[in-house]
Image: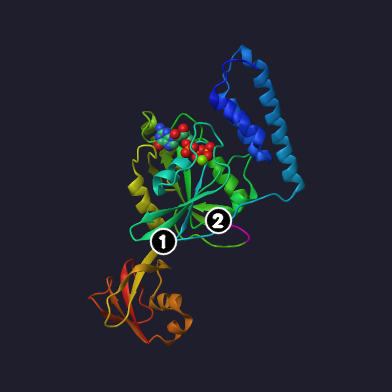
Amino acid sequence: MPANLTPQYLAAEEEYRKARTIEEKIAALRKMWAYLPKHKGTDKLQADIKAKLSRLKKELEQEKKSGKKRTGFYVRKEGAGQVVLVGPPNTGKSSLLKSLTGKEVQIAEYPFTTQMPDVAMMPYEDIQIQIVDLPPITKERFVYWQIDIIRGADLVLIVLALDDGDSVFVFDDLLELLREKNIIPIGEGEGGMELFGPVKKRTLVVANKSDLPESDEILKFLKEDVVKGRYPVYAVSSAKGKGIENIKNVIFDSLDIIRVYTKEPGKPPSMEDPLILKKGSNVKDAAARIHKDFARNLKYAKVWGSSKFPGQRVEQDYVLKDKDIVEFHI
Ligand SMILES: Nc1nc2c(ncn2[C@@H]2O[C@H](COP(=O)(O)OP(=O)(O)OP(=O)(O)O)[C@@H](O)[C@H]2O)c(=O)[nH]1
Ligand SMILES: [Mg+2]
Protein backbone atom coordinates (compact mmCIF):
# COMPACT_ATOMS: atom_id res chain seq x y z
CA MET A 1 0.00 0.00 0.00
CA PRO A 2 1.42 3.41 -0.93
CA ALA A 3 2.52 5.57 1.95
CA ASN A 4 1.03 8.91 3.07
CA LEU A 5 -2.63 8.08 2.56
CA THR A 6 -4.69 10.50 4.63
CA PRO A 7 -7.07 9.42 7.40
CA GLN A 8 -9.91 10.82 5.26
CA TYR A 9 -8.89 8.55 2.42
CA LEU A 10 -8.71 5.53 4.69
CA ALA A 11 -12.12 6.33 6.14
CA ALA A 12 -13.50 6.51 2.60
CA GLU A 13 -11.98 3.12 1.85
CA GLU A 14 -13.65 1.74 4.94
CA GLU A 15 -16.93 3.18 3.71
CA TYR A 16 -16.39 1.50 0.37
CA ARG A 17 -15.93 -1.84 2.05
CA LYS A 18 -19.13 -1.41 4.01
CA ALA A 19 -21.14 -0.10 1.06
CA ARG A 20 -24.05 -2.31 0.12
CA THR A 21 -25.70 -0.65 -2.85
CA ILE A 22 -24.11 0.41 -6.11
CA GLU A 23 -24.84 4.04 -5.27
CA GLU A 24 -23.11 3.78 -1.90
CA LYS A 25 -20.12 2.17 -3.55
CA ILE A 26 -19.92 4.88 -6.19
CA ALA A 27 -20.19 7.57 -3.51
CA ALA A 28 -17.39 5.98 -1.47
CA LEU A 29 -15.17 5.62 -4.53
CA ARG A 30 -15.71 9.27 -5.42
CA LYS A 31 -14.70 10.20 -1.92
CA MET A 32 -11.61 7.98 -2.14
CA TRP A 33 -10.72 9.68 -5.41
CA ALA A 34 -11.12 13.13 -3.90
CA TYR A 35 -8.91 12.34 -0.92
CA LEU A 36 -6.27 10.36 -2.76
CA PRO A 37 -2.96 12.21 -3.07
CA LYS A 38 -2.27 12.29 -6.81
CA HIS A 39 1.38 11.44 -7.40
CA LYS A 40 3.50 8.71 -8.98
CA GLY A 41 3.30 6.52 -5.89
CA THR A 42 -0.49 6.25 -6.18
CA ASP A 43 -0.66 5.64 -9.95
CA LYS A 44 -1.89 2.10 -9.56
CA LEU A 45 -4.48 3.08 -6.97
CA GLN A 46 -5.72 5.93 -9.13
CA ALA A 47 -6.19 3.53 -12.04
CA ASP A 48 -7.99 1.01 -9.82
CA ILE A 49 -10.44 3.59 -8.50
CA LYS A 50 -11.17 4.89 -11.99
CA ALA A 51 -11.73 1.38 -13.32
CA LYS A 52 -14.05 0.44 -10.46
CA LEU A 53 -15.99 3.65 -10.82
CA SER A 54 -16.59 3.18 -14.50
CA ARG A 55 -17.62 -0.45 -14.01
CA LEU A 56 -20.09 0.45 -11.28
CA LYS A 57 -21.56 3.30 -13.31
CA LYS A 58 -22.16 0.84 -16.15
CA GLU A 59 -23.75 -1.59 -13.74
CA LEU A 60 -26.03 1.14 -12.46
CA GLU A 61 -27.04 1.97 -16.04
CA GLN A 62 -27.74 -1.70 -16.72
CA GLU A 63 -29.85 -1.98 -13.63
CA LYS A 64 -31.82 1.10 -14.63
CA LYS A 65 -32.43 -0.25 -18.13
CA SER A 66 -33.59 -3.64 -16.87
CA GLY A 67 -36.09 -1.81 -14.67
CA LYS A 68 -35.23 -3.93 -11.66
CA LYS A 69 -37.05 -2.77 -8.59
CA ARG A 70 -34.81 -0.81 -6.26
CA THR A 71 -35.25 0.99 -3.00
CA GLY A 72 -36.67 4.48 -3.20
CA PHE A 73 -37.60 7.18 -0.77
CA TYR A 74 -40.81 8.97 -0.08
CA VAL A 75 -41.16 12.08 2.03
CA ARG A 76 -44.43 12.58 3.84
CA LYS A 77 -45.58 16.18 3.76
CA GLU A 78 -45.61 18.03 7.03
CA GLY A 79 -46.21 21.64 7.95
CA ALA A 80 -47.52 24.46 5.80
CA GLY A 81 -45.69 23.52 2.60
CA GLN A 82 -43.00 21.33 1.11
CA VAL A 83 -39.98 22.91 -0.54
CA VAL A 84 -37.43 20.81 -2.41
CA LEU A 85 -33.79 21.73 -3.01
CA VAL A 86 -32.64 20.72 -6.48
CA GLY A 87 -29.32 21.27 -8.18
CA PRO A 88 -26.05 20.06 -9.60
CA PRO A 89 -23.44 18.56 -7.24
CA ASN A 90 -21.65 20.62 -4.61
CA THR A 91 -23.64 23.86 -4.92
CA GLY A 92 -24.45 23.98 -1.20
CA LYS A 93 -27.93 22.43 -1.10
CA SER A 94 -27.24 20.70 2.18
CA SER A 95 -25.60 23.83 3.57
CA LEU A 96 -28.75 25.75 2.66
CA LEU A 97 -30.91 23.14 4.40
CA LYS A 98 -28.76 23.58 7.48
CA SER A 99 -28.94 27.37 7.48
CA LEU A 100 -32.71 27.37 6.92
CA THR A 101 -33.56 24.75 9.51
CA GLY A 102 -30.57 24.32 11.81
CA LYS A 103 -30.40 20.59 11.07
CA GLU A 104 -26.89 19.14 11.10
CA VAL A 105 -26.42 17.38 7.79
CA GLN A 106 -23.53 16.00 5.82
CA ILE A 107 -21.71 18.80 4.03
CA ALA A 108 -18.47 18.21 2.16
CA GLU A 109 -16.20 19.64 -0.46
CA TYR A 110 -16.58 16.67 -2.80
CA PRO A 111 -19.60 16.13 -5.07
CA PHE A 112 -22.39 13.58 -4.43
CA THR A 113 -22.20 13.96 -0.68
CA THR A 114 -25.96 13.66 -0.20
CA GLN A 115 -27.23 10.18 -1.01
CA MET A 116 -30.82 10.23 0.20
CA PRO A 117 -33.39 12.88 1.03
CA ASP A 118 -32.68 14.93 4.11
CA VAL A 119 -35.76 16.51 5.63
CA ALA A 120 -36.12 19.26 8.22
CA MET A 121 -38.64 21.87 9.30
CA MET A 122 -37.99 25.58 8.86
CA PRO A 123 -39.74 27.70 11.48
CA TYR A 124 -41.31 30.74 9.86
CA GLU A 125 -43.07 33.16 12.20
CA ASP A 126 -45.81 30.96 13.69
CA ILE A 127 -45.70 28.11 11.16
CA GLN A 128 -43.33 25.39 9.99
CA ILE A 129 -42.28 24.81 6.40
CA GLN A 130 -40.77 21.51 5.32
CA ILE A 131 -37.47 21.61 3.45
CA VAL A 132 -36.26 18.55 1.52
CA ASP A 133 -32.65 18.28 0.40
CA LEU A 134 -31.97 15.84 -2.42
CA PRO A 135 -28.88 14.18 -3.82
CA PRO A 136 -27.55 16.20 -6.75
CA ILE A 137 -29.17 15.85 -10.14
CA THR A 138 -27.05 15.24 -13.21
CA LYS A 139 -27.57 13.81 -16.69
CA GLU A 140 -26.06 10.58 -15.43
CA ARG A 141 -28.08 10.36 -12.29
CA PHE A 142 -31.68 11.44 -11.86
CA VAL A 143 -33.56 8.58 -10.26
CA TYR A 144 -37.27 7.89 -10.07
CA TRP A 145 -37.73 8.75 -6.41
CA GLN A 146 -36.06 12.13 -6.88
CA ILE A 147 -38.49 12.79 -9.71
CA ASP A 148 -41.44 11.72 -7.54
CA ILE A 149 -40.39 13.99 -4.68
CA ILE A 150 -39.97 16.99 -6.98
CA ARG A 151 -43.32 16.31 -8.63
CA GLY A 152 -45.02 16.27 -5.27
CA ALA A 153 -43.36 19.36 -3.81
CA ASP A 154 -45.07 22.73 -3.47
CA LEU A 155 -42.02 24.75 -4.45
CA VAL A 156 -38.69 24.02 -6.14
CA LEU A 157 -35.51 25.86 -5.25
CA ILE A 158 -32.82 25.35 -7.87
CA VAL A 159 -29.61 25.83 -5.95
CA LEU A 160 -26.59 26.99 -7.98
CA ALA A 161 -23.19 28.16 -6.75
CA LEU A 162 -21.48 31.44 -7.53
CA ASP A 163 -18.10 29.72 -7.52
CA ASP A 164 -15.73 28.50 -10.20
CA GLY A 165 -17.71 25.30 -10.75
CA ASP A 166 -19.97 24.77 -13.73
CA SER A 167 -23.36 24.90 -11.98
CA VAL A 168 -24.48 28.16 -13.64
CA PHE A 169 -23.53 26.73 -17.03
CA VAL A 170 -25.61 23.59 -16.59
CA PHE A 171 -28.73 25.49 -15.49
CA ASP A 172 -30.49 25.02 -18.82
CA ASP A 173 -29.51 21.35 -18.94
CA LEU A 174 -31.07 20.95 -15.51
CA LEU A 175 -34.31 22.58 -16.67
CA GLU A 176 -34.29 20.21 -19.64
CA LEU A 177 -33.78 17.18 -17.38
CA LEU A 178 -36.82 18.26 -15.37
CA ARG A 179 -38.93 18.83 -18.49
CA GLU A 180 -37.98 15.40 -19.81
CA LYS A 181 -39.55 14.02 -16.65
CA ASN A 182 -42.71 16.05 -17.17
CA ILE A 183 -41.83 18.65 -14.57
CA ILE A 184 -42.26 22.15 -16.00
CA PRO A 185 -40.46 24.73 -13.88
CA ILE A 186 -42.33 28.03 -13.92
CA GLY A 187 -41.10 31.36 -12.60
CA GLU A 188 -44.43 32.69 -11.53
CA GLY A 189 -48.07 31.69 -11.48
CA GLU A 190 -49.73 28.69 -10.01
CA GLY A 191 -48.17 25.28 -9.96
CA GLY A 192 -50.22 22.12 -10.46
CA MET A 193 -50.59 18.85 -8.61
CA GLU A 194 -51.08 16.39 -11.50
CA LEU A 195 -50.32 12.76 -10.70
CA PHE A 196 -49.44 11.87 -14.30
CA GLY A 197 -48.44 14.01 -17.24
CA PRO A 198 -46.71 17.36 -17.18
CA VAL A 199 -46.87 19.20 -13.90
CA LYS A 200 -46.06 22.88 -13.50
CA LYS A 201 -43.79 23.65 -10.58
CA ARG A 202 -43.25 27.07 -9.12
CA THR A 203 -39.46 27.48 -9.21
CA LEU A 204 -36.92 29.94 -7.79
CA VAL A 205 -33.19 30.11 -8.35
CA VAL A 206 -31.02 30.40 -5.27
CA ALA A 207 -27.49 31.52 -6.09
CA ASN A 208 -25.41 30.30 -3.16
CA LYS A 209 -21.83 31.14 -2.08
CA SER A 210 -22.35 34.89 -2.50
CA ASP A 211 -19.51 35.38 -0.02
CA LEU A 212 -16.87 34.40 -2.59
CA PRO A 213 -14.87 37.24 -4.17
CA GLU A 214 -15.86 36.26 -7.73
CA SER A 215 -19.54 35.89 -6.84
CA ASP A 216 -20.74 39.37 -7.94
CA GLU A 217 -19.52 38.87 -11.45
CA ILE A 218 -20.93 35.34 -11.72
CA LEU A 219 -24.26 36.53 -10.31
CA LYS A 220 -24.48 39.21 -12.99
CA PHE A 221 -23.68 36.62 -15.66
CA LEU A 222 -26.23 34.19 -14.20
CA LYS A 223 -28.99 36.80 -14.21
CA GLU A 224 -28.27 38.44 -17.56
CA ASP A 225 -26.98 35.61 -19.72
CA VAL A 226 -28.41 32.44 -18.21
CA VAL A 227 -31.70 32.97 -16.40
CA LYS A 228 -32.68 36.08 -18.36
CA GLY A 229 -35.69 36.92 -16.25
CA ARG A 230 -37.39 33.53 -16.60
CA TYR A 231 -37.10 32.83 -12.88
CA PRO A 232 -36.47 35.03 -9.85
CA VAL A 233 -32.87 34.78 -8.67
CA TYR A 234 -31.81 35.29 -5.04
CA ALA A 235 -28.20 35.45 -3.93
CA VAL A 236 -27.37 33.91 -0.56
CA SER A 237 -24.42 32.66 1.40
CA SER A 238 -25.38 29.61 3.40
CA ALA A 239 -21.94 29.61 4.95
CA LYS A 240 -22.14 33.21 6.16
CA GLY A 241 -25.90 33.43 6.65
CA LYS A 242 -26.19 36.23 4.09
CA GLY A 243 -29.62 36.57 2.45
CA ILE A 244 -31.05 33.70 4.50
CA GLU A 245 -33.72 35.75 6.29
CA ASN A 246 -34.78 37.19 2.94
CA ILE A 247 -35.01 33.78 1.30
CA LYS A 248 -37.25 32.58 4.16
CA ASN A 249 -39.69 35.39 3.34
CA VAL A 250 -39.44 34.60 -0.36
CA ILE A 251 -40.17 30.92 0.32
CA PHE A 252 -43.28 31.80 2.31
CA ASP A 253 -44.48 34.27 -0.35
CA SER A 254 -43.84 31.80 -3.17
CA LEU A 255 -45.83 29.04 -1.49
CA ASP A 256 -48.90 31.19 -2.14
CA ILE A 257 -50.51 30.36 1.15
CA ILE A 258 -52.30 32.36 3.79
CA ARG A 259 -52.75 31.79 7.51
CA VAL A 260 -56.23 32.17 8.90
CA TYR A 261 -56.98 32.14 12.63
CA THR A 262 -60.39 31.20 13.88
CA LYS A 263 -62.36 32.42 16.85
CA GLU A 264 -65.60 31.53 18.52
CA PRO A 265 -68.12 34.26 19.29
CA GLY A 266 -67.34 35.97 22.59
CA LYS A 267 -63.91 34.33 22.88
CA PRO A 268 -60.45 35.47 21.92
CA PRO A 269 -59.09 34.02 18.67
CA SER A 270 -56.94 30.91 18.81
CA MET A 271 -53.58 32.14 17.62
CA GLU A 272 -51.99 28.71 17.49
CA ASP A 273 -52.21 26.32 14.58
CA PRO A 274 -53.71 28.62 11.95
CA LEU A 275 -55.57 27.13 9.01
CA ILE A 276 -53.26 27.05 6.00
CA LEU A 277 -55.16 27.92 2.83
CA LYS A 278 -54.26 28.70 -0.75
CA LYS A 279 -54.06 32.38 -1.57
CA GLY A 280 -57.43 33.46 -2.95
CA SER A 281 -59.43 31.20 -0.60
CA ASN A 282 -62.68 32.59 0.74
CA VAL A 283 -64.64 32.24 3.95
CA LYS A 284 -66.43 29.14 2.69
CA ASP A 285 -63.10 27.43 1.86
CA ALA A 286 -61.90 28.18 5.39
CA ALA A 287 -65.07 26.73 6.90
CA ALA A 288 -64.78 23.63 4.73
CA ARG A 289 -61.31 23.04 6.09
CA ILE A 290 -62.81 22.68 9.55
CA HIS A 291 -65.71 20.45 8.49
CA LYS A 292 -67.80 20.01 5.35
CA ASP A 293 -71.06 20.44 7.26
CA PHE A 294 -69.68 23.58 8.73
CA ALA A 295 -69.28 25.06 5.25
CA ARG A 296 -72.74 23.89 4.22
CA ASN A 297 -74.49 25.44 7.19
CA LEU A 298 -72.50 28.63 7.22
CA LYS A 299 -74.64 31.77 7.28
CA TYR A 300 -72.02 34.49 7.49
CA ALA A 301 -68.75 35.29 9.15
CA LYS A 302 -67.03 38.15 10.88
CA VAL A 303 -63.51 39.10 9.88
CA TRP A 304 -60.71 40.95 11.62
CA GLY A 305 -57.70 41.99 9.59
CA SER A 306 -58.29 42.54 5.91
CA SER A 307 -61.84 43.81 6.44
CA LYS A 308 -62.76 47.51 6.33
CA PHE A 309 -63.27 47.51 10.07
CA PRO A 310 -62.59 44.91 12.81
CA GLY A 311 -65.29 42.28 13.11
CA GLN A 312 -66.97 43.27 9.86
CA ARG A 313 -69.74 40.92 8.76
CA VAL A 314 -68.87 39.24 5.43
CA GLU A 315 -70.45 36.69 3.10
CA GLN A 316 -69.16 33.23 2.18
CA ASP A 317 -67.38 34.46 -0.93
CA TYR A 318 -65.30 37.02 0.95
CA VAL A 319 -61.66 36.47 -0.05
CA LEU A 320 -59.41 36.14 2.97
CA LYS A 321 -55.92 37.53 3.40
CA ASP A 322 -52.90 36.27 5.33
CA LYS A 323 -53.34 36.64 9.12
CA ASP A 324 -57.09 37.27 9.00
CA ILE A 325 -59.15 36.20 11.99
CA VAL A 326 -62.52 34.63 11.16
CA GLU A 327 -65.54 34.00 13.33
CA PHE A 328 -68.01 31.63 11.70
CA HIS A 329 -71.76 31.92 12.27
CA ILE A 330 -73.99 28.96 11.46
N1 LIG B 1 -17.85 29.79 0.25
C1 LIG B 1 -18.96 29.09 0.45
N2 LIG B 1 -18.91 27.74 0.45
C2 LIG B 1 -20.07 27.06 0.65
C3 LIG B 1 -21.31 27.72 0.87
N3 LIG B 1 -22.26 26.78 1.03
C4 LIG B 1 -21.64 25.60 0.91
N4 LIG B 1 -20.32 25.75 0.69
C5 LIG B 1 -19.31 24.69 0.51
O1 LIG B 1 -19.59 23.99 -0.67
C6 LIG B 1 -19.30 22.59 -0.51
C7 LIG B 1 -20.53 21.77 -0.82
O2 LIG B 1 -21.52 22.00 0.16
P1 LIG B 1 -22.77 21.02 0.36
O3 LIG B 1 -23.75 21.73 1.20
O4 LIG B 1 -22.32 19.67 0.76
O5 LIG B 1 -23.28 20.98 -1.16
P2 LIG B 1 -24.41 20.04 -1.80
O6 LIG B 1 -25.00 20.79 -2.93
O7 LIG B 1 -25.33 19.54 -0.77
O8 LIG B 1 -23.49 18.85 -2.36
P3 LIG B 1 -24.00 17.40 -2.90
O9 LIG B 1 -24.85 16.78 -1.86
O10 LIG B 1 -22.73 16.68 -3.12
O11 LIG B 1 -24.72 17.70 -4.17
C8 LIG B 1 -18.82 22.43 0.92
O12 LIG B 1 -17.41 22.46 0.90
C9 LIG B 1 -19.39 23.65 1.62
O13 LIG B 1 -18.61 24.03 2.74
C10 LIG B 1 -21.32 29.15 0.90
O14 LIG B 1 -22.34 29.83 1.09
N5 LIG B 1 -20.13 29.76 0.67
MG1 LIG C 1 -25.78 17.65 -0.26
238 is within the stretch colored magenta: no
Q: At label 2, which amino acid type do we have?
A: Val
Q: At label 1, which amino acid type do we have?
A: Asp
197 is within the stretch colored magenta: yes
153 left or right, relative to 208: right
Where does the magenta region start and end? 196-200
State the predominant SS element of the stretch in magenta: loop
- Residue under the point 60% across and 57% down: 198
**Image mark for residue 75:** 2
- Residue under the point 41% across and 78% down: 287
Element at label 1: loop
Rate crowding at label 2 as few (under 14), some (14 to 19) or many (20 or more) other CA atoms within 10 Å. Answer: some
Q: Position of residue 285 (x, y in %)?
A: 43, 75
Q: Residue furthest top?
A: 40
70 left or right, relative to 293: right
State the CA–CA distance, disc 1 to disc 2. 21 Å
